[in-house]
Amino acid sequence: MYTCGLTVYSHPQIGNWVAYIYSDVLTRTLILSGFDVNRVQNITDVGHLVSDDDDGEDKMEKGARAEGLTAWDVADKYIAVATEEAAKLGLLTPTKTVRATSLIPEQIEFVEGLEKKGFTYIIENEGVYFDTSKLDDYGKLAKLDIEGLQAGVRVEVNGKKNPTDFAIWKFSPKNQQRDMEWDSPWGKGFPGWHLECSVIARENLGDQLDLHTGGIDHIPVHHTNEIAQTEAFTDKHFVKYWFHNNHMKINGIKMSKSLGNSYKLQDIISKGYSLNAFKIMVLSSHYRTEGNFTWDILDAANNRYLHWQSLLNRKWQDLGKSQDQTDLIPRMVESAINDMSDALLNDLDTPSAFRILDETITDLEELDIDIKSAGSIEKLEEFLGDTLGITFNNSDLTSSQKGTIRKRQEARDNKDYLASDKLRDDLMGEGIEVKDTAGGPVWSRL
């Protein structure tokens, strides 16, 4: 499995993490199904131009100029940021993560191979270009209407034979030294953005992949060109299955740094939300559908998370209420886990999995979660962590706090609501909120 990674020229925005949250659940679901997943993810630290159509400045060089650093330093800085934030999100670490700059000789050899097969031509002062007209099926992934494409639909570069042709090796500008440039048979330069993925995938996973993931924006250009150059080089079908997730908008508007309508993960944390709530918000939309971020939607996702957590917390209370459930709770949990697994195996249907969980949590709230049932609740919690990457803060209560909850319940039973309210306020002062349900008091941490 190959995952298109971040271009590390600036701080990742929340929209960048959507693709990795979905691919993380995909990986977890494959593991649930019994597969051993060998997942490689690239780090784009060179060659991604401002326009995906080989036009404009390299994003790394642009980021370096903005921060007064070298492109190498910018890459190191944001690789560290991305690694830290992926850990905060609880994402599985790829089997291998590879920087584009670590395989420059291999990328040059790949271009030489395409050149020997007659798939390339050179545009002076521009670079080595791939001739898409040499392939009968170019654009098959995006179902491109090649004949209908007019010159200039993709940014026109003087000397391009076809509007869909793309650079696989770019020449460094004359009289200008770049932070990242290498000698090559065609002159000093750097690899095109599409080249790195073909080479990193081939060097680490072979000529053919089972799965390739990325955002839908990669379909018409990046992944289309990746297919073209790889299949031209290997004469083999490149990828069996593609997994493309849709985008997330902000308040119904496309996320854009120029519009200033993007947020970082820290913005969510600073407002007191758990990143688990952000993941729930993302996964509440199917990966094929467009998501939307607003603070109200995130608030609803956070309430959903706290609702789930309140039930899971009950297994720690030990309130002394124990009755024979005739294995009802274990059977309910097992049924929910099976149904959620089926939903995930059905085109990664996370919204349906969440609906099943909501219904199960509501049903379980009507029952006593005693010591006998605790193992089943823990099994449900473990399933959510393993398959959806959603974890819960279930730190145990102290003996004193448990005692306070018991005393409060006794006060309520005796209709001494003044004492009950005071004990509730005492718990609030310790960061513990208690809610009363038909199945007994439920606590959660504030």
Image: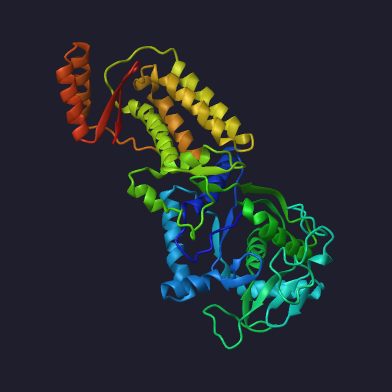
Name the spot of residue 159 as percent of width and height, x first: 76, 77
Nearest the viewer among 397 and 266 is 266
Q: Residue at x 48, y 59 (%)?
A: 257
Decide if residue 103 is on the left or right side of residue 365: right
Q: How many marks?
A: 0
Nearest the viewer among 65 and 348 is 65
Q: Residue at x 47, y 73 (%)?
A: 64
Q: Residue at x 60, y 30 (%)?
A: 342
Decide if residue 212 is on the left or right side of residue 432: right
Seen in the picture, residue 274 relative to 137 is either above or below; the reply is above
Decide if residue 143 is on the left or right side of residue 329: right
Seen in the picture, residue 96 relative to 428 is either above or below; the reply is below
Nearest the viewer among 331 and 444 is 444
Seen in the picture, residue 356 relative to 140 is either above or below; the reply is above
Residue sitting farthest toward the bottom:
175
Nearest the viewer among 25 and 333 is 25
Q: How is the image coloured?
A: rainbow
Residue 131 visible to an observer of this rendering: yes
Residue 72 visible to an observer of this rendering: no
Name the spot of residue 246 as percent of width and height, x first: 60, 46
Which quadrant is home to the C terminus? Answer: top left
